[in-house]
Image (tube, rainbow, N blue to C red):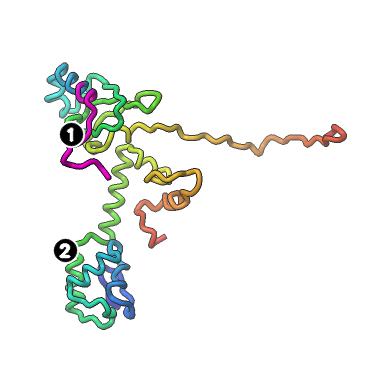
Amino acid sequence: MVQIQRVALFPNATFHIALQRVFGLGRSTSLAVAEACGISKDLKVKDIKDSYLQKVSSYIENNFTTGDTLKRQIRDNVLEQVAINTRRGVRHTLGLPVTGAQTRNNGVNARKLRPLFQYDTSRR
Amino acid sequence: MPRSIWKGPYVAVNLLQDVVALARKHPEWWNKGRFQGQKAPEVINTYSRASVILPDFLSCRFGIHNGKSFVNIEVQEAMVGHRLGEFAPTKGTPQHKVKDAGTNKKKINPKTGKS
């Protein structure tokens, strides 16, 4: 099983799509990583040699924040707003929408996600 | 789109004048006492919620208008760069009526007038 940044990638999946399982890499960044390490867009994960995988790991480590470090950063940003007592911080603690959405209807997701301060919905 | 950076941060002119007047009136607090933890000698009341908090405003006390009254704030380091209005909420929190299930109301039959 191939592991990048402690995330196991599916062996039969296209590489730059399978790479998106890493927290912090999405559609465009994953493609950029694959291009920079010389991996073609139509290769599957099981067809890639180990040296290329090593290159990918080191490229991600040097240029992107991912995984638990990113979650800690997000959490610290939120806690900073709460500590200063801005309106954004209050909305986070109350579990209400932060960016100005109306609360007359909707706002369900904000209330659901309040206990998950790290805002990572992949583990619930 | 936020304000262009080449224009510099927005601070209302009357707010700046009040701060400068305070600095002139209490020069040792402004130059030294601020950084040693002394509290500001006066509160500056302002209606300008849109003004950015500058690094020069550290440990000043402002009363920020929220439509009805002035909310007191002491500027800390982490607050620099935010606007004054973020720290003065403009709405009260709603207190919904709690229905008590405890009181038993006797049901009176409307036709006979008896319970």
The image shows a total of numbered marks equal to: 2
Q: Chain of mark 1?
A: B
Query: Which residue appears at 83% of the width and 36% of the height?
Result: B109
Circle on res. A62? 2
Q: Element type at marker 2?
A: helix
- Residue depicted at 24% across the width and 19% down the height: B42
Residue at horizontal 39 percent and vertical 26 percent from the top? B67
Placement of A113 over or under B86, stated as above or below: below
Residue at point 85%, 32% (across, down): B113
Q: Which amino acid, by three-letter code, is at mark 1?
A: Pro
CA gap, disc 2 to disc 1? 33 Å
The span picked out in magenta is B1-17
Q: Position of residue A61 (x, y in %)?
A: 19, 64
Q: Quadrant of residue B39?
A: top left
Q: Which sits in the foreground, B104 or A21?
A: A21
User: Numbered disc 2: what chain?
Assistant: A
Numbered badge on residue A34: none
Is B113 rendered above or below residue A18?
above
Q: Position of residue A38 (x, y in %)?
A: 18, 75
In the shown orientation, is residue A114 left or right of residue B6? right
Queried whether the magenta region covers residue A87, the answer comes back as no
Q: Position of residue A1 (x, y in %)?
A: 30, 78
Tell me where residue B51 appears, x and y as whole percent.
Answer: 26, 32
Callout 1: few (<14), some (14-19), or many (20+) C-alpha neighbours within 10 Å?
some
**Tag shown at residue B55:** 1
* Left or right of B1 on screen, residue B95: right
Q: Is residue B33 left or right of residue A122?
A: left
